[in-house]
Image (spheres, rainbow, N blue to C red):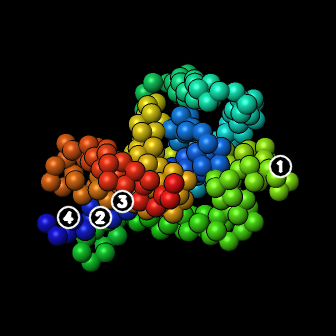
Amino acid sequence: MSFLILSQILNGFATGMLYALVGVGLTLVLGVLNLPNFAHGTLFAFGAYFTYTVANLTDSFYLGVLIGPLLVVLIGFVIESQGVRRLYAAHHDYQLLFLFAIALILQETVILIWGPVGFSLLPPKFLAGAVDLGFTVYPKYRLALILFTATIVVALYLMLTRTNVGAILRAGIENREMVKVLGININKVFLFTFGLGAYLAGLAGGLATPIWGLTPTMGFDILPISFVIVVVAGLGSILGAIAAGILIGLAQSLTTIWWPEAANVVIYLIMGLTIILRPQGLFGSR
């Protein structure tokens, strides 16, 4: 049983790091633009499908993961510049309805392009198989996924806390009116933020393909979990989104040992308890 628990902890970290990428992207958009991006899940799905397509065309999983998320960024740029930007002065309800409509359009676009049947994508040969860790034999790809996503998360955190761009984004989360007063082009900040959020969602989708496979509804499946992460973390908390993603991944993975049917229920149980006991979130201050 102890070996099983250790294996599930590793699985939880692998899942949690993917959740963290998606959660940080949604947190950035919600914090800076003050928009709950309902299209975030479908951007995750497009990242997976673009990765699958590029990997099959080039016979390289690595090129798929490199190019796929960048194509998702282009979609994010179009959504923000041609749609969301025109609604900043409108009532908040119109912004929400627009993003909800975009989510449905992108959902159907996935089916129109790739069809209603799901696909699978094998990891690269170098990462196929398993490695003996002493206490368990664990898949190489999942282990590499943990290390790679941890590197991405650390690099993202350093960018947000140690660079001028990160300072502007954090200032936008705290007080975007002050960012305008300082003479910073707020439209460029919004565009960059939306693009970065789209990239993180697309990257998570691409990395998840060898584990979860591809289905047309995968975007709507990940979206509620993304909002759970934002709530548990605390609105606008980047560090909290990372921690919440890992926490939820571990909770979900460990629950499958004793009560597999409740693996998804525990996610929303954590959110409910957070709202009741600490409504500002684990790392939130407002």
* C-alpha span from label 4 to label 2: 9 Å
Give the labeled residue for mark 3: 247
Give the labeled residue for mark 2: 9
Name the front one of labels 1 and 2.
Answer: 1
* C-alpha span from label 1 to label 2: 44 Å
Screen quadrant of the N terminus = bottom left
* C-alpha span from label 3 to label 1: 36 Å
Q: Is residue 55 visible?
A: no
Tell me residue 16's x, y (percent): 40, 57
Q: Which mark is residue 185?
A: 1
Question: What amino acid is labelled 3 in the image?
Answer: Leu
100 with respect to 116 (left or right): right
User: In terms of secondary structure, where does tag 3 sit?
Assistant: helix
Give the labeled residue for mark 4: 4
Against 25, residue 118 (above or below) is above
Against 83, residue 25 (above or below) is below
* Mark 1 or 2, nearer chain start: 2
Name the front one of labels 3 and 4.
Answer: 3
Q: Residue furthest bottom?
A: 134
* Mark 4 or 2, nearer chain start: 4
* C-alpha span from label 3 to label 4: 18 Å
Tell me residue 95's x, y (percent): 63, 29
User: In terms of secondary structure, where does tag 2 sit?
Assistant: helix
User: In terms of secondary structure, where does tag 4 sit?
Assistant: helix
Question: What amino acid is labelled 4 in the image?
Answer: Leu
User: In terms of secondary structure, where does tag 1 sit?
Assistant: loop
- At a point 41% along the width and 66% down the height, the residue shown is 143
